[in-house]
Image: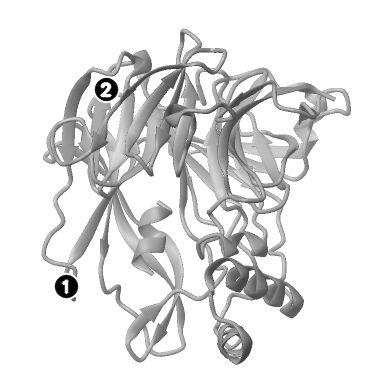
Amino acid sequence: MHSALLRAAAALLAACATIHPATLAAQSVRDSAGARVVTNTRPTWSAAQRLRLSSRPTLVIGDRAGDPYEFTAISGAFFLSDGRILVADGGSNELRMFSANGTHVQSFGRRGDGPGEFRRLHSVQRLAGDTIAVLHEMSSLSRFTSGGTYLSRTNELTSGMIKPGAVIKSVQLALNGSARLVISMPWDPPTQGAGVEFDARALHEVVSGTAAATRSLGELPVMRASANADGASKPWLGAEAVYASDGSRFCRGYGTSYTLTCYTAAGVTTLIIRRAWQPPNVSRQQFVQFTDAWLSRWSKATGAARDDARREQLDMPYFKTLPAFSALLLDRVGRLWARTPASIDAAVAGSLNDYAIGASLWSVFDARGVWLGDVTMPARFSPLDVGADYVLGVMRDDDGVQTVVRYSLGAV
């Protein structure tokens, strides 16, 4: 349960555009305590404005021989201002730099506990001035220059051991300067009796510099759970909190409703986006398909043992509706992208927030919170960096081999 949460754990206001009068009927807008609240009823792109990816990648990194081009677990990739591409490989705990044409330039970072080293590299973000931020060991955040020079490290201490009464702290996002979004969750969240579904909650704080300089966002839901005799469990296909940041701002959503909230890097709410949405039902057939995909990926049992494992899996509890979204991404021109979940995607590692096994659908909202339309991404592709005319991300082939690929992005 907790590993799923901590895993689920990149110019929204600066790029405000004028809304054409024809779009006004598609949303209502109001202000609430200084925040803009936009309720969308339908997408607003015209047929000529709809975006799609090119049919083939325009760049592939990872199709050459040599260690720098072999990736084990890509945990982030983005363009720097000069066109170079930074790729974080969680398998080797390395940060690898490539030229704009995909040629390896340098590598830095490595496995270890010293400055500029990582035991477990989770994700990487691009901050102001092309500063590279690395989230690792659940609660640690290291920063590097765009040239690979180590700058600093912060660590959020976990109170107590991993046992009843402990509070688990994790860094969800890096923000410009020394700021970061930290969430703190009890290892054993309170429940309301066996069989009762509930939202596990965690304290969200924007921490700047020292831990004494914080702004609390309050205790917010992070995971849909269910109480049992032993405490709490996480049934399959439940909602989990998702986050996105570009350094100067961040957005958050929890998919029991289609509501996305965006904040400044100081933690001030500026925008609340809502969208018309009906929770999609999860049929028994879909759960069976998910189960078979899960066992195919993770079970080594055969014969009668495999049949027993399948029956046991099919008897497990699961949520009967899917959440509103399963991933978020802030692009380079201020748009917010939200991925529509599919039950089969949880077969990757147990969470809907992992990469999409099939083609994925992303709803796109502009800087003012207006729902522009939807964009389809290829199967087994995870977008990591989106610009005005490109999408950079990770592609996985039938054997699970990973490459970094760039697609062109343009109107139909």
* Percent coordinates x, y for residue 42 in the rendering: 78, 42
Q: Could you give the CA–CA distance between mark 2 and mark 1, rounded to whole angstroms?
A: 35 Å
Q: Is residue 331 left or right of residue 320?
A: left
Q: Splitting the image into 4 quarters, where does residue 96 fall?
A: top left
**Quadrant assignment for the N terminus:** bottom left
* Percent coordinates x, y for residue 212 in the rendering: 11, 40
Q: Vertically, is 271 above or below 323?
A: above
Decide which of 53, 366 is in the foreground and name it.
Answer: 53
* Percent coordinates x, y for residue 95 in the rendering: 35, 29
What amino acid is at disc 2?
A: Phe
Q: Splitting the image into 4 quarters, where does residue 62 fall?
A: top right
Which one is earlier in the sequence, the residue at label 2 or at label 1?
Answer: 2
Q: Is residue 103 visible?
A: yes
* Percent coordinates x, y for residue 129 in the rendering: 35, 13
Q: Secondary structure at mark 2?
A: strand
Q: Vertically, is 250 above or below 12?
A: below
Point out which mark residue 144 bears: 2
